[in-house]
Image (cartoon, rainbow, N blue to C red):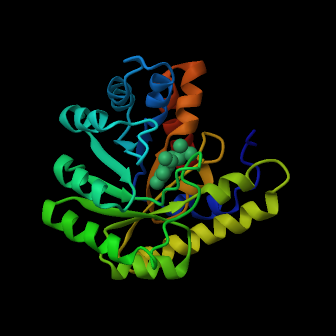
Amino acid sequence: MVVENTTPTVHSQHAKARSVPIRLHINIDHVATVRNARGTRYPDPLFAAHVCEAAGADGITAHLREDRRHIKDDDVERLRASISSHLNLECATTDEMRAIAERIRPDTVTLVPERRQERTTEGGLDVATQRRDIEAFVSMAKRCGIRTSLFIAPDEEAIKLSHALGVEQIELHTGVYCHACEPGHHGARALELERLARATSLACSLGVEVAAGHGLTRQNIGPVVAIPGIVEVNVGHSVIADAVFMGLSEAVKSLRAAIDRSLA
Ligand code: PXP
């Protein structure tokens, strides 16, 4: 259960300073989760992607996990062949995924940590430990004209190292902030917003673009998109959950409206 925004400190301080619109990327993994639950061909993540685009999404995000629990290889190929917006492929830093990215050529490849036991991507990438694998990805991506993004915690060292590795973008993990938006955590929420704002400012000063994602909802996204420097959000679970009750198109539009309200 997520509470409505009641302490918009960062939000109200910075909303007026923003001049760059926020790009909204919808993660359609959980359409595939529903499909795979019954082993049917429907609901089709590709159809979902087209609905999202028609509803105003600026891009489509799909996570090809090593265990293929939701998105499958064929989904990524079909998405690449037929969406007209931006394709952001999330994957782990493995040789297998690097070869797939090289073949599929998404617009952006977002490198994420992956553990088979986890329900979702639970933390940011350990950039120092995975440095060699990330370098291999960055070099392939630059050769193929793909942007690289690293999904990291709002941590100074991780940001500096990401910059040193030559990536175009980082995506800040908003999971701790979103958890702090649940009842009883309001102190932590303000602290997390400050951490996100500081991290964004550091990345921007280094010339690295900043996206944000994980756990974002219509109710908690406002203060995040109001942070100056954040130019993109990736949202999945809450949109698909909203779609159950209001339909996917309306769910995307409602999220966009929540973002626009926050920036007005
Ligand atoms: N960004 C990244 C890098 C992710 O791994 C995920 C989850 O797959 C998301 C954003 C979307 O998170 P959520 O489904 O909680 O909106």
Q: Is residue 84 visible?
A: no
**Could you tell me which residue is drawn at 32 percent across and 27 percent down?**
46
Task: Determine whether 130 is above or below 233 in the image.
Answer: below
Where is residue 207? Give x, y as percent: 35, 76
**Left or right of 11 in this view: 66:** left
Does 173 sit above or below residue 4? Answer: below
Q: Which picture quadrant has residue 99?
A: bottom left
Is residue 9 shown above or below 264?
Answer: below
Residue 192 position, x and y percent, is: 67, 65
27 vs 106, left or right, is right
Q: How many marks?
A: 0
Residue 113 location, x and y as percent? 48, 60
In this rendered view, identify the residue nearer to me: 21 or 2.
2
Q: Residue at x 38, y 26 (%)?
A: 48
Front residue of 20/185: it is: 185
| Closest to the observer, 126 or 235 | 126
Residue drawn at the location 48% of the way across and 66% of the way down: 125
Residue at the spot 40% in from the left edge and 48% down from the top edge: 66
The N terminus lies in which quarter of the figure?
A: top right
Determine if residue 209 is in view. Answer: yes
Across and down, in percent, residue 236 comes to: 50, 40
Residue occupying the far right of the picture: 184
Up/down of 136 relative to 50, above or below: below
